[in-house]
């Protein structure tokens, strides 16, 4: 099912949402920055941070927890009971990229380079000959964290000239260890140079830095594309597009005390390498937050079981739009198009968690919001990716539905979507969260 409409008939978001997404992408070159950006938006809507190490109270209102590159936020309406079910918008904050190794200073033949490790299913060639910055967090000896963002041309992974590789246009083969180490200057290599430089950028003493989580990002800004500016090109849409939409949807409900559900944002880290982390969907973070919220409102284990039984999660992650140059790679009867609205992702082998009843929940939300939607299923001859959806369903016993926005160039340093789809997704999420 789909529709040719490109404007929601109800809901708070329009093309201005896409403008704000561009700002969010620029401000979020790492999962840690994405979480900080999300928290800032939630704070403006009246949410407050609670610490995992503190005792929680059962008061109503908006709250959020941050752990590393993950954030869980929820809004408890005054009408909520201890067994009120949740409506969860799930997403992930990480994207495939190049990440700095523990001993980063390297080089050869007069070039200074940075030793990097490949993170996730990176489309390697998209990082070649591109101006790159460096971002992430530094951990100091006292255990504190400092965000750093060198958002200017600093690094480059230079491709071999065609004169030295005459067959390159017949097939480019990149060795992940040898060919992906970026350059950042010339001269002799000195151990400690990179971290000293990054520490200075962060305004801290290099001698106080005892750990780091740093990653490379493309510095070219998001931009509208096309004759009629109907497309959006930018970095990290997989999956900050979904994070941004879920944050906006949750924040829009912050003054609603008549909600039949407790709306939740669950944005995890490390989805791109399997979610096996304390900040990933396979970890205990979401379950702990939901359970503690029940118990803080005076609930029992029975209340917890009742709440979970009535809970539904929309796992929102980008999917594949039909590619005009490779249409044969897609299922012949399912060709999601950009600006056609969010996609419902189905895989009977449970790479996606959607079933028929989940489809009905999503369809009802889109109908309520006046948002068109589409179905996605993989070609039987192509392996299917997966999401946080099946993990969330299996780990917590929560009904989960996989959805997202159809894009091109997934896992590239720079991806492409329809300029209307971000706000169509956000309006659908509002309708879902408010029930």
Image (cartoon, rainbow, N blue to C red):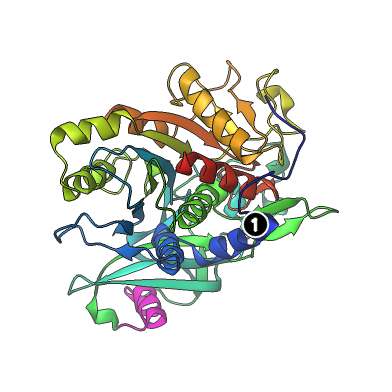
Measured as percent of width and height from the top left, residue 2 is found at 70, 28
Q: Image point 30% across, 49% down: which residue?
A: 279
Above or below: residue 202 compared with residue 414: below
- Which residue is at 60% across, 62% downward? 20
Is 100 or 109 nearer to us in this picture? 100
| Residue shown at 35% from the left, 67% from the top | 137
Q: Is residue 64 above or below residue 420?
A: below
Which of 374 and 384 lies nearest the eye of the viewer? Answer: 374
- Quarter-of-image position of residue 203: bottom left
Q: 111 or 217: which is nearer to us?
A: 217
Residue 165 pos. (x, y %): 67, 47
Label 1 CA crowd tier, 10 Å (few <14, some 14–19, many 20+): many
Q: Is residue 209 visible?
A: yes
Q: Is residue 201 magenta?
A: yes
Question: Where in the figure is residue 337, as x and y percent of width and height?
Answer: 71, 34
Residue 420 appears at what percent x and percent y? 70, 48
Which residue is tagged 1?
18
| Numbered marks: total | 1
Give the left or right position of residue 132, taking residue 279 as reference: right
């Amino acid at each position: 099912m789909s529709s040719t409409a490109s404007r929601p008939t109800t809901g708070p978001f329009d093309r201005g949402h896409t403008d704000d997404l561009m700002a969010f992408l620029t401000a979020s070159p790492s999962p840690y920055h994405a979480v900080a950006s999300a928290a800032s938006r939630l704070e403006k809507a009246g949410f407050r941070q609670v610490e995992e190490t503190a005792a929680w109270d059962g008061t109503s209102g908006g709250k959020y927890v941050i752990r590393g590159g993950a954030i869980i936020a929820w809004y408890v309406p005054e009408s909520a009971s201890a067994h009120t079910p949740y409506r969860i918008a799930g997403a992930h904050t990480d994207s495939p990229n190049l990440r700095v190794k523990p001993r980063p200073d390297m080089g050869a033949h007069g070039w200074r380079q940075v030793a990097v490790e490949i993170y996730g299913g990176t489309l390697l060639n998209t990082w070649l000959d591109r101006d790159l910055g460096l971002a992430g967090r530094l951990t100091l000896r006292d255990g504190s964290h400092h965000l750093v963002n060198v958002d200017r041309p600093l690094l480059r992974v230079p491709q071999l000239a065609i004169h030295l590789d005459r067959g390159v246009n017949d097939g480019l083969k990149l060795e992940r260890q040898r060919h992906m180490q970026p350059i950042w200057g010339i001269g002799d290599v000195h151990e400690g140079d990179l971290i000293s430089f990054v520490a200075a950028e962060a305004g801290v003493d290099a001698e106080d830095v005892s750990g780091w989580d740093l990653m490379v990002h493309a510095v070219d800004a998001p931009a509208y594309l096309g004759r009629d500016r109907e497309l959006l090109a930018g970095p990290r849409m997989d999956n900050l597009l979904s994070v941004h939409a879920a944050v906006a949807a949750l924040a829009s409900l912050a003054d609603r005390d008549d909600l039949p559900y407790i709306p939740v944002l669950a944005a995890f880290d490390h989805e791109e390498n399997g979610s096996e982390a304390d900040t990933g969907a396979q970890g205990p973070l979401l379950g702990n937050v939901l359970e503690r919220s029940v118990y803080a409102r005076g609930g029992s284990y029975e209340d917890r079981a009742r709440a979970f039984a009535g809970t539904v999660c929309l796992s929102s992650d980008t999917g594949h739009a039909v590619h005009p140059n490779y249409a044969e790679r897609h299922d012949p009867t399912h060709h999601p198009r950009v600006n056609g609205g969010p996609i419902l992702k189905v895989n009977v082998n449970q790479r996606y968690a959607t079933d028929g009843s989940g489809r009905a929940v999503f369809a009802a939300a889109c109908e309520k919001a006046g948002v068109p939607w589409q179905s996605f299923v993989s070609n039987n001859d192509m392996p299917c990716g997966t999401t946080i959806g099946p993990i969330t369903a299996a780990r917590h016993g929560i009904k989960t539905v996989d959805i997202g926005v159809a894009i091109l160039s997934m896992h590239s340093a720079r991806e492409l979507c329809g300029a209307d789809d971000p706000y169509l997704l956000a309006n659908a999420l509002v309708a879902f969260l408010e029930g």
